[in-house]
Amino acid sequence: MSSTKHFLSLLDLTSEELNALTQRAIELKKMLKAGRHYEPLKHKVLGMVFEKSSTRTRLSFETAMIQLGGHAIFLLPADMQLGRGEPLEDTARVLSRFVDAIMIRTYSHHKLEVFATYSTVPVINGLTDLVHPCQLLADVQTFVEHRGSISGRTVAWIGDGNNMCNAYIDAARQFGFHLNIACPQGYDPDPQRLADNKNRTTLMRDPREAAAGADLIVTDVWASMGQEDEHQARAKAFAPFQVNASLMACAKPDALFMHCLPAHRGEEVAAEVIDGPQSVVWDEAENRLHSQKALLELLLAPRP
């Protein structure tokens, strides 16, 4: 078993490391826009295991490795011995002999933890049903670029208490902001995370109350991958939680709107919001690239 540094949640890095990573992501973005080539990961290889499909996760990690001078290999479980029943522990042992880091996008967070336990190279959480920490790196970077430090701010999460909401709870703790969470009854986030972060979170049932005075409004789809059969019941439960102009008006006048995408206009967010002047979703999507470059650098080529 390994003592290798992994990134399974935001809690795997200190607040200082996370803030430094945000600043480094902004710096790497400026370097790229200025046409400066920076390749600290020359000859390094990232193995990418996808049990859940993705647009932004694959594109951002693959592009990040290319821009940093390395390579990325796209792996589907069906194309590996995993698809034939090889123990997860054995796949982790073998795969980590070939590559320098492994990114996994899967359903079970426990599966990710088991994989990391037996991997001798860094394992990165590309998404699990519990948390989506890489998206939070991009979200915080986006906020900092537009509004400065997120520390001491108020963020409102509106909708499902899903993996993104859980990751926002971790972020509130690590970056020092307060998180108002508005979820329908029965769709709350991880109770242990709520209990551990009572001083940083407030759970509410009224989305307008949660949005009041917020610096940032965030939402996500009402039915995540694997929950499609619940769509009708969820649409009914979440209807009052749509982020529209009326809800945005409850927040601060300069509040930003974020969504990790893909978005369903007319469901969790109105077109007038996601396509409006307060929306920074396209910067947020792009920043997956820059924040993950900073993360890869930290794990594979840490600077003095």
Image: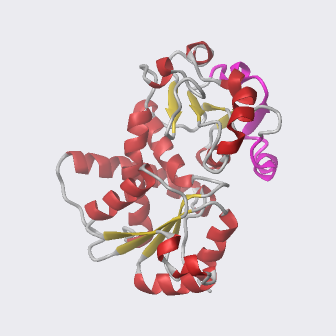
**Residue 260 is one of the magenta-drawn residues:** no
**Residue 190 is one of the magenta-drawn residues:** yes
Residue at horizontal 62%, vertical 83%? Answer: 89
Give above or below for 211 relative to 300. Answer: above
Q: Is residue 66 visible?
A: yes
Closest to the observer, 6 or 228: 228
Q: Quadrant of residue 11?
A: bottom right
Give above or below for 199 relative to 239. Answer: below
Question: What's the magenta region?
Answer: 188-213
Residue at horizontal 62%, vertical 17%? Answer: 247
Q: How is the image coloured?
A: secondary structure
Closest to the observer, 198 or 97: 97
Q: Position of residue 153 (x, y in %)?
A: 59, 32
Q: Position of residue 194 (x, y in %)?
A: 78, 46
Q: Is residue 161 visible?
A: no
Residue at horizontal 62%, vertical 43%? Answer: 176
Q: Is residue 165 left or right of residue 105?
A: right
Q: Position of residue 141 (x, y in %)?
A: 45, 43
